[in-house]
Image (cartoon, helix red, strand yellow):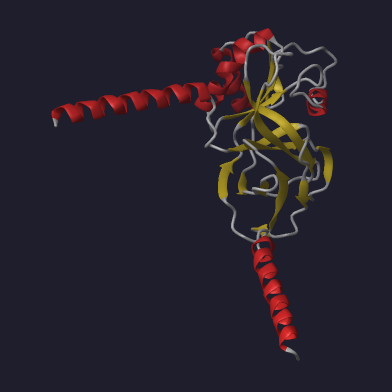
Amino acid sequence: MRPGEDARDMQKRIGVILIALILLPLAGADTRAPDESRDARGGHAILLEQYTATWCDTCATVDPWISEFTDDHAGRVVRVALHPDDHDPFGSPLTTERLALKQSEQQYSLPTFWFDGEGELEGQVSQSLLENSLRSAEVNREHWIGMHVWWDTWDNQLHDDVQQLAIHIEEDLSENASITVFRLESLEMTSDIANNGIDVHHDVATQLVTFDRDGIVSDSFEGVHGWAISNGNLYSEGGIPVFILETFGNVDGFVTVIEENGEVRGVIGISNEEIPRNPEIDGNFALIILLGALVVSGIIVRRR
C-alpha cells in the first residue's frame, strides 16, 4: 500500500473513532441514572377537585388561598384544578369528562368543589367550610388502598425532559377497579383575554389516563406530550405489578386515584417541591434575607 493510501486509511479510522465517541453518550442516555428522583407512599388522602376558570371573578377571590389550604393540609388532601373547555386557555376535554362523571345534569357554578367526587360545594366558600367537608370525607372513607409511587426525571437539553412515573398498588384490586393519573402543571397567563387578575394558576390538570388492574387503558387525554404506559409486565413488587407511565416536558406533579364501584379508595400526590407555590412571596422573602445580610455585614464592617 502506498504512503498516500496509508494516510487516507488512517484518517478514515480516526473519523470512525471520533463519530463513535460522539455517539457513545447518546447511546447511553436511555440507561443512565435519572437526574432527579422522588417517591411518595400513602393513599389515604382525599381528592379535592375544583372547577375553576381564568375568567371567573369569584374564583379570583378563592384561588389565591386554595393553594395555601392544600399546603396546610398536606398529606390529607390533594387538589386537582379543572378548567372549562370554553373560553379558558387552560381548559380541555379532560374537564368535560370529569364533570360528566359527577352524574348530574345541572350547570355547575364557578367555582365548584368535590371531595372524593362528592360533598359538592359551590361559589364563595370559606376555609372553615372546606375543612368541615374534608373531615366529613375522611370519615366517609371506609377503606383506603395504599400505594407507593416513584417519579424519575431525565433532563434533556435538546428535547423535552423525560418524566417516568412508577405506581405500585399495595394490594390486589377488584375487577371493576380503575386507576386514574392526573398530570398537574402551574400555568401562567400570557394575555389579558379571559384573565381574572391571577397570573399563575396552580394544580391545573393537563393530562389524564385511566386504566384497569391489567394496565388496559379505558380513557386517556393525551394533552401536548402524550402518555406511554406499561401494563406492569416489566417487573413487580411483592407479586403485584408496577405500572410504568412515561410523558415529557415540565411537570409540577402527578395525582394517582384508585376507584372501585365508582367510589374513591385511594389517592396519592407527588410533586416537584422545588417549584414555589407563591413566587411573589418567595421573591419578597429573598429580598428581606438580602437586606438583612447587608445590614449584618454593615455592622461587622463598622466594628472593625
Residue furthest to the bottom in view is 1
The location of residue 60, given as percent across then percent down, is: 63, 12
The location of residue 180, given as percent across then percent down, is: 74, 38
Q: Quadrant of the C terminus?
A: top left
Q: Is residue 28 visible?
A: yes
Task: Decide which of 266, 72 is in the foreground and name it.
Answer: 72
In the picture shown, does residue 184 fall above or below 4? Answer: above
In the picture shown, does residue 172 fall above or below 298? Answer: below
The location of residue 136, given as percent across then percent down, is: 60, 21
Task: Decide which of 152, 76 is in the foreground and name it.
Answer: 152
Residue occupying image coordinates x 81% and y 41%:
176
Task: Decide which of 80, 240 is in the foreground and name it.
Answer: 80
Residue occupying image coordinates x 71% and y 51%:
244
In the picture shown, does residue 104 fall above or below 253? Answer: above
Q: Quadrant of the N terminus?
A: bottom right
Q: Is residue 293 left or right of residue 15?
A: left
Q: Quadrant of residue 132?
A: top right
Total number of numbered discs in the rendering: 0
Residue occupying image coordinates x 14% and y 29%:
303
The location of residue 240, given as percent across then percent down, is: 69, 55
Q: Quadrant of residue 16?
A: bottom right
In the picture shown, does residue 220 fall above or below 49? Answer: below
Residue occupying image coordinates x 51% and y 21%:
280
Task: Decide which of 163, 118 is in the foreground and name it.
Answer: 163
Q: Is residue 98 left or right of residue 239?
A: right
Q: Is residue 170 visible?
A: no
